[in-house]
Structure formats: C-alpha cells, structure tokens
Image (spheres, rainbow, N blue to C red):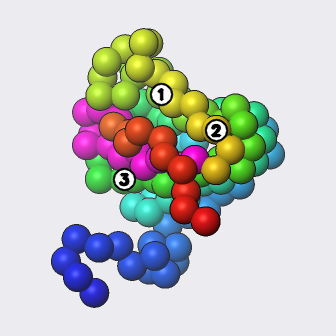
C-alpha cells in the first residue's frame, strides 16, 4: 500500500459504521479513528465539541437522500455559527476530522458511481 493511502478494509475493522434512522448526536466514545456514517434521510449528525478525546479522529459521511447534514456547534475550523452546518445532497460525501481544538471538513462532493 502506498504511503498516505487508507486501507478501507482496516478502516472498517478499526472504526465504526453508522446508518442514520433519524437525527443523531455522536459522542467521543462513538467516534473511532475511522468512522463511516450514511445519512439515510433528511437527518442531521451532530458532532461533539472538539477536544483532546477526539483529536486525530475522522469520519466519512455520505448521504443517500437530499437534506442530510453534518453539524458542529462551534463551527468547522472554529469559525462559528456561520460555518456550523454542512448540507449534503443525495449521492454526496465529505470527510470531517478533529485536531483536538477544531473540527474541519472537506467540501461535499459527488461520490463516483
């Protein structure tokens, strides 16, 4: 495996996998080093506040329905309420990760078929 690449099989074995059935708030104990979440409806996933307990944790979030969202109260990159919610349309995904001080996220992008 090339340096910097993620072995998806190891990621699934080491992490957690969630499919939403409604709005959900994840706590630090639910987010492992590699976590995958599928937003299965117009649901919102709320992340815990960035803290030492979630430093280095990341999750891949995908949506199979319009209106799914990822939320963190302090805003991504610590930017406040204006940047607190990422909305995903059907077929989009994004990565979110914590450095222990802030949560960061990529811009949602379509998942290739």
- Range covered by the magenta-colored residues: 92-103
Around disc 3, counting alpha carbons within 10 Å, would you say few (fewer than 14), some (14 to 19), or many (20 or more)?
Answer: some
* Figure quadrant of residue 68: top right
The residue that label 1 is drawn on is 72
Around disc 2, counting alpha carbons within 10 Å, would you say few (fewer than 14), some (14 to 19), or many (20 or more)?
Answer: some
Q: Locate residue 108 relative to residue 53 in the image: left or right.
A: right
* Figure quadrant of residue 32: bottom left
- Residues at badges 1 and 3 in contact (C-beta under 8 Å)? no
- Indicate the secondary structure of the residue bearing disc 3: loop
The residue that label 2 is drawn on is 89
Examine the rendering and report whether any part of residue 42 can be seen.
yes
For marks 2 and 3, give the CA distance. 24 Å
Examine the rendering and report whether any part of residue 51 can be seen.
no
**Is 96 inside the magenta-drawn segment?**
yes
Q: Quadrant of the C terminus?
A: bottom right
The residue that label 3 is drawn on is 57
**Observer-nearest of 81 and 88:** 88
x and y percent of residue 106 in the render?
Answer: 38, 42
- Indicate the secondary structure of the residue bearing disc 1: loop
Residue at (64%, 38%) from the top-left corner?
89
- Indicate the secondary structure of the residue bearing disc 2: loop
- Residues at badges 2 and 3 in contact (C-beta under 8 Å)? no
Dot 2 or dot 3: first in sequence order is: 3
Dot 1 or dot 3: first in sequence order is: 3
x and y percent of residue 108 in the render?
Answer: 48, 41
Residue at (46%, 53%) from the top-left corner?
59
> Quick check: 52 above or below 19?
above
Q: Locate residue 75 relative to residue 68 in the image: left or right.
A: left
């Amino acid at each position: 495996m090339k340096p910097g690449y993620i072995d998806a099989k190891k990621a699934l074995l080491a992490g957690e996998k969630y499919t939403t059935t409604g709005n959900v708030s994840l706590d630090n104990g639910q987010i492992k080093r590699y976590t995958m979440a599928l937003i299965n409806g117009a649901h919102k996933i709320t992340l815990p506040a960035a803290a030492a307990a979630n430093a280095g944790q990341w999750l891949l979030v995908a949506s199979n329905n319009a209106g799914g969202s990822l939320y963190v109260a302090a805003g991504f990159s610590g930017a406040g309420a204006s940047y607190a919610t990422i909305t995903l349309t059907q077929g989009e995904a994004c990565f979110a990760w914590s450095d222990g001080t802030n949560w960061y996220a990529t811009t949602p992008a379509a998942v290739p078929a």
